[in-house]
């Protein structure tokens, strides 16, 4: 049997994978003569979508950037057995290194199994870990195995998973809950979405093992409503698991019972904080609770509860099957195992990367990611989303683990990694993240509600050329006050992007404030557009396209920009074929 598999994660569908699948279905016809057509999830190479994998005679032929027009050629090559007809579509050796240089545990099935078919998961050993747990291990054995593995929470805090499980296990109360935090909200982050869409049964199995360990009979997945495909596939996975006896009462003939349900979150970033998530689950406005008591003691409906994120649970079945020691053998002394990152921004190969802890930022950005788009100069990488910080080029060899990243002023976070080149204004970047956190603040505590707003106002003033002496010092003072006084992690980490950009790019702040210039030429209010008379050919293209008629001049004569009229849209610079438009 020759199998043709089309990647149907959100990224693939957005790139046209649905149309490619329909075209292949038509090209293959009803009589397929030993050829099957199916789907899979995202394999992580988002920069090459749509992706079509052909499994034939034990070999994998990976076709990339496939279009509807290629369907007939693919169908003919498969029928004839002449795969050389597809050489122009096959992945290059360089792009294939994107995957070959990774170590995949949480993502081990993504882009390989069919997320809509439980049998596809079972064929790769799926649900073998829960069988092992129920037949051979006590809850204490499970917790000890996770302890040996060194698995830490992958949602950002890096708290030991076994400790949370053990606390919930020992908490008094007959009714306990296991909760999955799938409220992934960091800009540029899509690690959890990939697992939800591409390998939902792996999440369910990890949660089942966690529920058994803490003594919970009910599991809840709190997932963003903005992930509709993930919700659909999770719902189907739960139905299939129930039918197969992996979910429900007396699972696999044991005394262990566990049922699942899904809660779609309304899109509040603060609900990524576990107590705010619990409030939302209970039907209240998502606002953090004072701690203690912690969720392990009084969580959902004030019952003992355990909360981990998607990636944390996605490692659990592998750890049970392979042993805690195998997971702990990867990584660094303080950060064990692998970590998934969403590589985005000014990067040649954007997508999902899973690497052992201990690799450097350079390894990820240049070795796996292929370096900066258009071979531009690398400037910084934003780690940890709005709660993280910007790490500059001189720290590119920083080791990826919780301790080393924290020393830079950034954090591991859930795994967002936004790459920036020399065209990025670091003051503007700090403003972008402050805009986000100020809007997403729940408003419960004054430091976060008012403090982030005041910081936002100062940053807006600076990028508009209205910055004043003392603004940098005022920002630093506000940052310290907010970190010390905010109630939850959102407010406590909101200053990180500002603090790290001031720490590493203070000269850019000073240029905005003192010189009224943006070194990156990104802040429109601080730019001056002019035309080089020596280079201008008088083609009139810029004048004809200027939206405010700010450019004048005779044909075949040098043109002039009226600074009073110019709205600094940059259209003239984009259109000019002679490089005559200057920006200062």
Image (tube, helix red, strand yellow):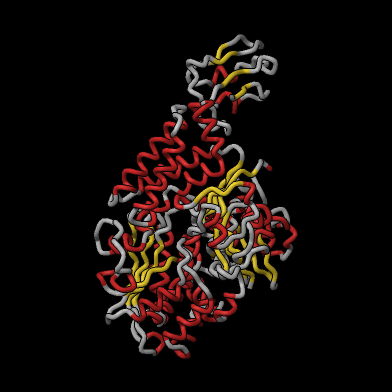
- Residue furthest to the top in view is 554
What residue is drawn where x is 39% and y is 64%? 181
Where residue 7 sits in the image (x, y, percent)? 56, 60
User: Which of 419 and 259 lies nearest the eye of the viewer?
Assistant: 419
Give the answer, above or below, for where 469 lies relative to 350: above
User: Which of 275 and 416 lies nearest the eye of the viewer?
Assistant: 275
Determine whether, in the image, residue 150 is placed left or right of residue 479. Answer: right
Q: Quadrant of residue 99?
A: bottom right
What residue is drawn where x is 59% and y is 24%? 584
User: Which quadrant of the rendered structure holds the N terminus?
Assistant: bottom right
Determine whether, in the image, residue 290 is placed left or right of residue 579. Answer: left
Determine whether, in the image, residue 247 is placed left or right of residue 520. Answer: left
Q: Quadrant of residue 212?
A: bottom left
Give the answer, above or below, for where 460 lies relative to 357: above
Where residue 293 sits in the image (x, y, percent)? 29, 69
Q: Is residue 551 visible?
A: yes
């Amino acid at each position: 049997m020759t199998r043709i598999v089309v990647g149907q994660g959100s990224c693939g569908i957005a790139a046209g994978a649905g149309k490619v699948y329909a075209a292949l279905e038509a090209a293959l016809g009803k009589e397929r003569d030993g050829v099957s057509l199916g789907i899979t999830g995202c394999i992580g190479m988002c920069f090459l979508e749509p992706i079509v994998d052909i499994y034939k005679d034990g070999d994998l032929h990976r076709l990339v950037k496939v279009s509807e027009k290629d369907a007939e050629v693919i169908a003919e090559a498969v029928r004839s057995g002449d795969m050389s007809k597809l050489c122009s579509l096959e992945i290059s050796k360089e792009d294939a290194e994107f995957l070959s240089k990774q170590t995949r545990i949480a993502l081990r099935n993504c882009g390989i199994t069919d997320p809509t078919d439980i049998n596809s998961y079972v064929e790769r050993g799926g649900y073998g870990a829960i069988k092992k747990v129920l037949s051979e291990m006590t809850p204490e054995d499970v917790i000890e195995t996770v302890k040996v593995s060194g698995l830490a929470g992958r949602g950002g805090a890096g708290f030991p998973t076994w400790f949370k499980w053990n606390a919930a296990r020992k908490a008094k109360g007959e009714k306990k809950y296991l909760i999955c935090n799938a409220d992934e909200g960091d800009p540029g982050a899509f690690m959890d979405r990939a697992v939800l869409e591409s390998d939902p049964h792996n999440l369910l199995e990890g949660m089942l093992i966690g529920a058994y360990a803490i003594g919970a009979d009910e599991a809840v997945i709190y997932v963003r409503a903005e992930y509709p495909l993930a919700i659909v596939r999770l719902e189907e996975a739960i139905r299939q698991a129930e039918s197969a006896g992996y979910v429900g009462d007396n699972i696999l003939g044991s005394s262990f019972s566990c049922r699942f349900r899904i809660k779609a979150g309304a899109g509040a970033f603060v609900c990524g904080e576990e107590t705010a998530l619990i409030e939302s689950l209970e039907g209240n406005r998502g606002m953090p609770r004072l701690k203690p008591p912690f969720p392990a003691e009084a969580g959902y409906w004030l019952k003992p509860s355990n909360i981990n994120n998607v990636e944390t649970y996605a490692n659990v079945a592998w750890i049970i099957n392979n042993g805690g020691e195998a997971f702990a053998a990867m990584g660094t002394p303080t950060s064990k195992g692998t970590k998934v990152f969403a590589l985005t921004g000014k990067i040649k190969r954007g997508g999902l990367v899973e690497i052992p802890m201990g690799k450097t930022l350079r390894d990820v950005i240049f070795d796996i990611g292929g370096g900066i788009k258009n071979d531009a100069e690398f400037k910084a990488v934003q780690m940890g989303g709005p709660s993280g910080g910007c790490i500059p080029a001189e720290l590119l060899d920083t080791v990826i683990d919780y301790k080393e990243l924290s020393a830079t002023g950034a954090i591991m976070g859930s795994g967002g990694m936004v790459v920036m080149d020399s065209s990025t204004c670091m003051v503007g970047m700090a403003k972008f993240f402050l805009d986000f956190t100020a809007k997403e603040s729940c408003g419960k505590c004054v430091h976060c509600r008012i403090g982030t707003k005041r910081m936002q106002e100062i940053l807006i003033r600076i990028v508009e050329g209205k910055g004043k002496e003392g603004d940098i010092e005022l920002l630093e003072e506000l940052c310290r006050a907010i970190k010390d006084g905010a109630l939850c992690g959102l407010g406590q980490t909101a200053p990180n992007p500002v603090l790290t950009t001031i720490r590493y790019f203070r000269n850019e702040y000073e240029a905005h404030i003192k010189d009224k210039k943006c070194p990156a030429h990104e802040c429109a209010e601080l730019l001056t557009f002019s035309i080089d008379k020596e280079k201008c050919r008088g083609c009139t293209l810029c004048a004809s396209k200027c939206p405010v008629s700010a450019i004048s001049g005779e044909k075949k004569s040098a043109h002039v920009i009226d600074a009073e009229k110019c709205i600094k849209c940059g259209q003239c610079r984009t259109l000019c074929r002679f490089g005559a438009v200057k920006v200062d």
